[in-house]
Amino acid sequence: WLSMKGKVRFLERPMSVYRVASNAGSWSHGVGRRYGSLTRFLRGEIAMFEALLPHLEGEKLALARQEKLKREFEQMYIEGRVWEQVKGPYRALYKKQPLPYRLKQFLKRNVPGLNDYYRKKRGYVE
């Protein structure tokens, strides 16, 4: 059927992997829903970058600082510190985010009641 509609191609390599026996003991299992675990994981990454920075120079130092900023930015998002995301060195990261992300953050900062209503309607009530 597909060949009647156009050209068909075949890739002889795996393009994704499905983990069949994932369990609660694996580090990534449900981490998106467990904010405490994710926050601890990010804090560990940030601490690792802080320990690494004094040992780097030049381009590697700049890259490591940028990665550390990204982790801090993500941590601010998880912890709900939306005002900090638009200040200082994080502003450039904020501007690179997609429009829907920036709109949600704008609502959180400027119209918290509307954001709370949106979260209740979507079923995100804690």
Image (cartoon, rainbow, N blue to C red):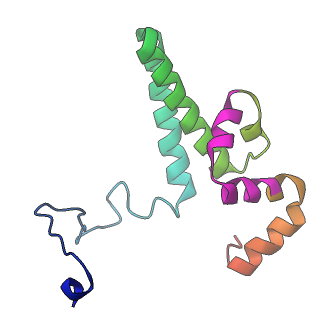
Residue at point 68%, 27% (across, down): 89
- Horizontal and vertical percent for residue 11? 15, 64
- Horizontal and vertical percent for residue 34? 52, 60
Between residues 39 and 116, which one lies in front from this camera angle? 116
Picture mark count:
0
Q: Residue 70 in magenta? A: no
Q: Residue 95 in magenta? A: yes
- Horizontal and vertical percent for residue 73? 62, 39
2 vs 43: above or below: below
Magenta span main SS: helix
Task: Locate the C terminus by quadrant.
Answer: bottom right
Task: Locate the N terminus by quadrant.
Answer: bottom left
Seen in the image, is 98 located left or right of residue 65?
Answer: right
Seen in the image, is 65 located left or right of residue 97?
Answer: left
Residue at point 69%, 78% (across, down): 122
110 vs 68: above or below: below
* Range of magenta residues: 89-106
Please identify the residue farthest to the bottom as the structure is shown.
Answer: 1
Between residues 16 and 77, which one lies in front from this camera angle? 16
Quarter residue 35 falls in: bottom right
- Horizontal and vertical percent for residue 30? 44, 64
Residue at point 23%, 70% (across, down): 21
30 vs 68: above or below: below
Residue at point 80%, 42% (across, down): 83
